[in-house]
Image (spheres, helix red, strand yellow):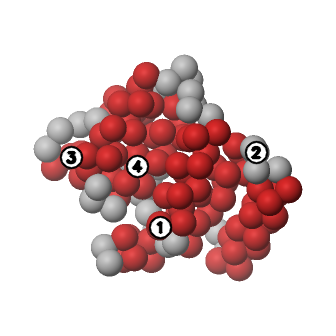
Amino acid sequence: MQLGRVEEAVVSYERTLHIRPDRVVACHSLANALAHLGRIEQALAAYRRAVTLDPNCAELHNNLGGLLRACGRLDEAAACFRRALGARSARGGSARQLGTGAKAAEPAAGGAGELPASARAQAQL
């Protein structure tokens, strides 16, 4: 994904949310784009906003948990994965994410919790 295009997408999602603050998909997409850019705290805020808008969406809880896990915030991540398991739209991914020990701290290869290098570096700050 080209960096300039992701930045353009962020502006577009923010514009959409300014007009329609209840748009869950725009909020979720904004969170994904911000995470891709390494803007971790903003991405976490956008995921939390999306979860508030649609608390029964397992994917939102799972993605928030994945980003928290990648940041080393394991207790918060585990709580998100548990909420994902209890959500109406739950799928199998959250159960895998709830592993114990060191595995819980490692993002799944290619999974929602895996961040680009720039985001991993910022998450460690």
| Disc 1 target residue | 40
Which x, y percent locates residue 46? 58, 56
Mark 3, residue position:
103
Q: Nearer the viewer, mark 3 or mark 2?
A: 2
- Up the image or down, 113 lies above or below 41; here it is above
Q: Is residue 117 visible?
A: no
79 left or right of 12 in image: left
Residue nearest the viewer, comparing 6 with 11: 11
> Residues under labels 1 and 4: Cα distance?
12 Å
Quadrant of the image containing the C terminus: bottom left
Residue 105 pos. (x, y %): 24, 52
**Crowd tier of the residue under label 1, counting other residues whose Cα lies within 10 Å: few below 14, some 14–19, many 20 or above:** many
Side of 112 relative to 46 (left or right): left
Residue drawn at point x = 59 percent, y = 49 percent: 49
Question: Where is mark 2, residue-wise?
Answer: 23
Label 1 or label 4, whichever lies nearer to me, is 1
- Point 23% across, 37% down: residue: 99
